[in-house]
Amino acid sequence: MEINIQPGIKGHQEEIVTYETTAAKYGSGLVEVYATPAMIALMENTCMKSVLPYLPKGISTVGTKVNIEHLKATPINMKVWCDSELIEVDRRRLVFRVTAFDENGEIGSGIHERFIIDIEKFMSKL
């Protein structure tokens, strides 16, 4: 599998906090604020989508590691977004710096790793 992905690729995704993305709905807490699992999902999605255009058909990435701090609560109806940057490529391992924001500033940050996979081979091993 010959894939040429270089560090420096950036991603950006946005969403509005709804009840569906709150800690109360996820079960990760009791309050109706943006859930840590929802923020991590936004971060993973941002990274995945940022490198997708560089991958051939049948090739994708899977998340394998997150090291994230959730620093601040965000209420329902506020916009949140994630910016990612690919900072390291080690064969099939991709390392991203991720930062999440709401309309008042930074709400979380950290490192996320993904691995490049052949979808068919990956699924056949399950």
Image (spheres, rainbow, N blue to C red):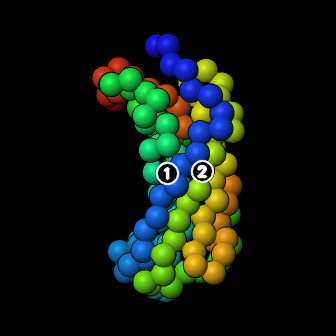
Residue 35 on image: x %, y %: 50, 72
Which residue shows up at 46% across the image and 64% down it? 14
Which residue shows up at 38% across the image and 23% down it? 56
Above or below: residue 97 compared with residue 20: above
- The crowd level at tag 1 (other Cα within 10 Å; few <14, some 14-19, many 20+) is many
Instruction: Answer whether labels 1 and 2 touch (C-beta < 8 Å).
Output: yes
Q: Which residue in the structure is indicated by mark 1?
A: 46
- The crowd level at tag 2 (other Cα within 10 Å; few <14, some 14-19, many 20+) is many
Above or below: residue 105 compared with residue 114: below
Is residue 25 visible from the viewing direction of this image?
no
Which residue shows up at 43% across the image and 27% down it? 55
Say whether residue 73 is left or right of residue 110. left
> Does dot 1 land on a helix, a strand or a loop?
helix
Residue 50 on image: x %, y %: 49, 43
Q: Which residue in the structure is indicated by mark 2?
A: 84
Say whether residue 79 is left or right of residue 10. left
Which residue shows up at 46% across the image and 13% down it? 1
Q: Earlier in the sequence, mark 1 or mark 2?
A: 1
Give the residue type that dot 1 points to.
Thr
Residue 63 on image: x %, y %: 50, 42
Give the residue type that dot 2 points to.
Ser
Residue 17 on image: x %, y %: 43, 76
> Does dot 2 land on a helix, a strand or a loop?
strand
Residue occupying the far top of the picture: 2
Q: CA distance from mark 1 to mark 2?
A: 7 Å
Q: Quadrant of the C terminus?
A: top left
